[in-house]
Amino acid sequence: MTDEQGPPEFGLTWPIKRSFVTYVLGMPDGRAGAVEGAFPLPDLSVVFEHDPSVDAAALGDGWAFRGDVRFAGHFGMLFVRIADPWLVRTDDGVLLTIADPDAQDDGPRVPLATVTVEQTGAGEWASTAVALTAQGSELFNSVYPVGDPLDPFTLRVPVGA
Ligand code: HEM
């Protein structure tokens, strides 16, 4: 359910990729929806709510956000789900992972993008690069090549989270 109280205080604010959103919404049957913790803003970005309930062992060193954003069009041929984005520090840098795009119960999380972030305030961070992984490229039908940029995001988490 969309929260009618306004966007959450802590979350990841991200347009994902505005050119893609504009493409989908330009189709006669194009649809975009945001539920379960994802709060759409008028500028086409979405706030994914910070989710402190995720088990630390599952998450590792990172931040979890929740929300389910789906795009559909081309009479069912196009379906893209971006849900529950997590930012996880790995030996190779920060990965942005998402819940199984096929929405299977207990399906594997997939790495969508490699990112770099910079701190912009207390508990506040902004991406400086968001580059598609191979799986991320496939999610968009390989229209965007590996390494192609997604849109930048900002995030706000409780200080010390
Ligand atoms: C019926 C099959 C499809 C047709 C006829 C089709 C057609 C097109 C066309 C004509 C464009 C260029 C749009 C423009 O420049 O304004 C485009 C772009 C694109 N298509 Fe499709 N497409 C199809 C299926 C898909 C599917 C299944 C995906 C999966 C996600 C997809 C993802 C994209 C993406 C990511 C772009 C680039 C959007 C952008 O950033 O400008 N398409 N497609």
Image: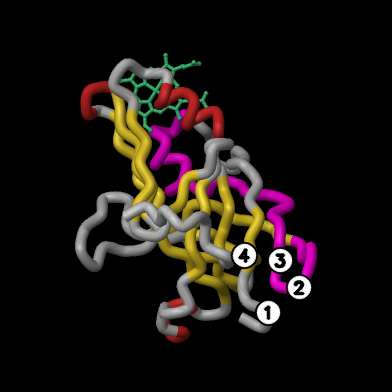
- Of tags 4 and 3, the one toward the viewer is 3
- What numbered label is drawn on residue 159? 1
Q: For the residues marked 2 and 3, what is the alpha-carbon distance in whole angstroms?
A: 5 Å
SS label for mark 4: strand
Of residue 28 and residue 116, the one placed in the foreground of this image is 28
The residue that disc 2 covers is: 122
Q: Are marks 2 and 3 in contact (CB under 8 Å)?
A: yes
How dense is the environment of label 4, judged by Cα within 10 Å: few (below 14), some, or many (20 and up)? some
Q: For the residues marked 2 and 4, what is the alpha-carbon distance in whole angstroms?
A: 19 Å
The residue that disc 3 covers is: 124
Is 74 part of what is drawn in magenta? Answer: no
Is 125 part of what is drawn in magenta? Answer: yes
The C terminus sits in image quarter: bottom right
* Residue shown at 42% from the left, 78% from the top: 54
SS label for mark 1: loop
Q: Are marks 1 and 4 in contact (CB under 8 Å)?
A: no
Q: Amino acid at mark 4?
A: Val
Q: For the residues marked 3 and 1, what is the alpha-carbon distance in whole angstroms?
A: 8 Å
Q: Amino acid at mark 1?
A: Val
> Quadrant for ligand 1?
top left
Q: Amino acid at mark 2?
A: Ala
Q: Is the CB of mark 1 within 8 Å of ligand 1?
A: no
In the rendering, at what x and y percent does residue 17 appear? Answer: 54, 37
How dense is the environment of label 2, judged by Cα within 10 Å: few (below 14), some, or many (20 and up)? few
The correct choice, above or below, for 150 with respect to 58 in the image is above
Of residue 41 and residue 23, the one placed in the foreground of this image is 41
The residue that disc 4 covers is: 94
Of residue 152 and residue 12, the one placed in the foreground of this image is 12
